[in-house]
Amino acid sequence: MVFTESFTAEVMCRFLERIAGHFDHKVHLVVDGHSAHRSRKVRDWLAAHPDDAKLRFRTAREIDDRLKCLDR
């Protein structure tokens, strides 16, 4: 998904809606601690769609380290 505006909770919710619509099972997303990921709006969306998506929080460094491992 490409977006041209600032990354906000609203943008994250649109992304969750879009990705959830493409799968017939729960999607697990690894995210960092960005404020949009932790926002009340996103938490409310997740609570209203418990079978659609789950966010797995990791630090940006953990994510970066894991991605480096994939590049090898």
Image (cartoon, grey):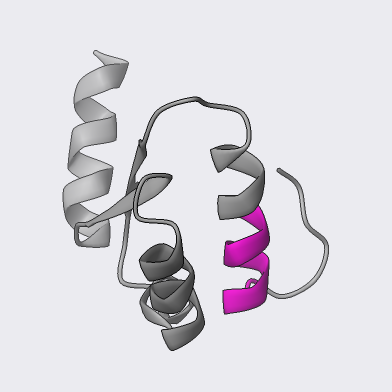
Q: In screen coordinates, is 35 left or right of 68?
A: right
Q: In screen coordinates, is 48 left or right of 26?
A: right
Q: Which residue is drawn at 25% across and 30% down?
A: 68
Q: What percent of the width, then of the height, locates residue 54? A: 31, 51
Q: Residue at x 40, y 64 (%)?
A: 46
- Magenta region, mostly helix, strand or loop? helix
Q: Which residue lies furthest to the right in this view?
A: 4
Q: Quadrant of residue 21?
A: top right
Q: Is residue 54 visible?
A: yes
Is residue 18 placed above or below 45 in the rendered structure?
Answer: above
Q: In screen coordinates, is 6 left or right of 61?
A: right
Q: Which residues make up the magenta segment?
A: 7-15
Q: What percent of the width, then of the height, locates residue 51? A: 36, 45
Q: What percent of the width, then of the height, locates residue 57? A: 22, 60
17, 3: nearer the viewer? 17
Q: In screen coordinates, is 45 left or right of 28?
A: right
24, 43: nearer the viewer? 24
